[in-house]
């Protein structure tokens, strides 16, 4: 090859070599850690015909505040981290199904999913921020958040098949989450703790309800660290006043941004290993709902297992009640104001599933429950 001996080419070749040598130190850390945070999905909760929380005292509804915060947060990340891809589940006032929000994150191989919401409660005294990760902590206030944030699926078409029969208003429905393994639990907790730390430190709403777990549909199927941030209560006058001001919404977006920045730093450096700051984790301010177990006939089997629930009743049924259809080996538990009747004692869900069709012939609404 005549060109091989050519001086300009040799110079070019050695120049390339020098360039490569220069680049190698920069490349090594990324290769060592393997993973870097490259894509973040920002999910503005609700939208379109689903306004989320509303208050007659607020000039903005939840969906508007969520979108405003999402856009502010996204803009900041785009500006400070041009190499990070920011994807929004919505950038306008439109309806997006809960499952689709997670799908958007999964399709784009996102490394972090941040869902932004505003809280609301029956009591106007409830205030402060909280960040949720997917989990099955059974405290009552979490259940309220779950019902409210999951209820939107009732506005979607054909929700019962899409969400495998899940009914956001039925506590029994949440049992499907008990068997779920969340591979990104630790990372989700780490990011949630960083968000809460920023809120506590910089406000504008400094009262923290901490990091919590809840079975939230929007976080259910995401395959990356995922959190749902409740930035304050629209039902509380002090929180509401702050949320209605653009300057405070910018502060909240900045808080989440700083949490993102430190999460990304740890994520890129450690390739997924995180130190969790325990001080940021919540001890729920209201104790878990008491579940009264009434005397069962016969004694309820001990230890975690599966049963098939056949019916629920507001009143306690007699053993020979026609509603029990002659069923004798029935467990009865009083939970959330209902007497719940179940049959069987299966060590695995599969075993219960085998028996389910037989039970359904007598009790068409029967379903499997997990019992601790
Ligand atoms: Zn919401």
Image: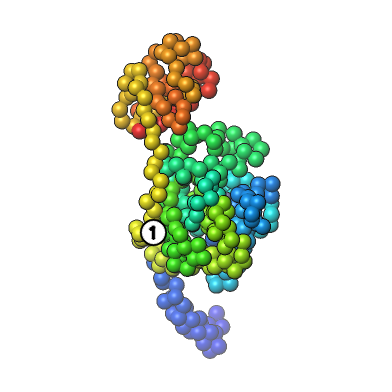
Up the image or down, 125 lies above or below 357; here it is below
Q: In the rendered image, which quarter is residue 292 located in?
A: top left
Q: Nearer the viewer, residue 34 or 257?
A: 257
**Disc 1 on helix, strand or loop?**
helix
Q: Is residue 285 visible?
A: yes
Q: Nearer the viewer, residue 29 or 342?
A: 342
Q: Quadrant of the C terminus?
A: top left
Indicate left or right for 32 with 58 as reference.
Answer: left
Q: In the rendered image, which quarter is residue 302 located in?
A: top left
**Residue for point 39% across, 18% down:** 330
**Residue for point 35% across, 17% down:** 297
Q: Nearer the viewer, residue 73 or 56?
A: 56
Q: Residues within 10 Å of mark 1 (few under 14, many from 20)?
A: many
Q: Please identify the residue farthest to the left as the structure is shown.
A: 302
**Residue for point 56% across, 83% down:** 3
Indicate left or right for 181 with 5 as reference.
Answer: left
Q: In the image, residue 218 lies at what x, y percent?
A: 54, 47
Identify the residue position indicated by label 1 in the image. 280
Q: Quadrant of the N terminus?
A: bottom right
Q: In the image, residue 225 lies at what x, y percent?
A: 47, 55
**Residue for point 44% across, 75% down:** 26
Q: Is residue 166 visible?
A: no
Q: In the image, residue 177 lies at what x, y percent?
A: 46, 39
Q: In the image, residue 155 lies at what x, y percent?
A: 65, 40
């Amino acid at each position: 090859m005549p060109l091989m001996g050519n001086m300009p080419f040799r110079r070019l070749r050695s120049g390339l070599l020098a360039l490569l040598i220069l680049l190698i130190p920069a490349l090594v850390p990324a290769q060592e850690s393997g993973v870097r945070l490259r894509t973040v999905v920002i999910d503005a909760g609700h939208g379109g015909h689903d306004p989320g929380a509303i208050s007659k005292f607020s000039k903005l509804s939840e969906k508007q505040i969520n979108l405003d915060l999402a856009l502010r947060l996204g803009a900041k990340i785009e500006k400070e981290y041009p190499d990070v891809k920011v994807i929004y589940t919505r950038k306008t006032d439109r309806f997006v199904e809960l499952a689709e929000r997670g799908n958007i994150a999964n399709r784009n191989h996102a490394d972090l999913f941040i869902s932004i919401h505003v809280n609301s409660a029956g009591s106007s005294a409830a205030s402060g921020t909280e960040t949720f990760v997917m989990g099955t902590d059974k405290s009552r206030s979490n259940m309220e958040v779950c019902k409210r944030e999951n209820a939107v699926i009732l506005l979607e078409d054909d929700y019962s098949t899409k969400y495998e029969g899940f009914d956001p208003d039925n506590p029994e429905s949440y049992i499907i989450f008990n068997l779920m393994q969340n591979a990104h639990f630790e990372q989700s907790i780490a990011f949630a703790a960083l968000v809460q730390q920023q809120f506590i430190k910089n406000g504008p709403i400094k009262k923290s309800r901490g990091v919590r777990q809840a079975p939230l549909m929007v976080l259910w199927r995401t395959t990356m660290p995922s959190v749902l941030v409740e930035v304050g209560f629209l039902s509380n006058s002090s929180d509401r006043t702050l949320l209605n001001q653009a300057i405070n919404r910018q502060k909240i977006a900045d808080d989440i941004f700083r949490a993102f920045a430190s999460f990304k730093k740890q994520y890129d450096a450690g390739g997924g290993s995180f130190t969790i700051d325990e001080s940021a984790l919540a001890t729920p301010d209201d104790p878990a709902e008491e579940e009264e177990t009434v005397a069962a006939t016969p004694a309820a089997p001990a230890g975690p297992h599966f049963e098939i629930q056949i019916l629920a009743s507001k009143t306690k049924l007699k053993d020979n009640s026609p509603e029990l259809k002659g069923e004798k080996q029935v467990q009865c538990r009083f939970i959330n104001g209902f007497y719940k009747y179940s049959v069987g004692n299966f060590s695995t869900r599969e075993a219960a599933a085998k028996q389910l069709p037989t039970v359904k012939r007598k009790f068409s609404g029967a379903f499997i429950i997990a019992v601790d």
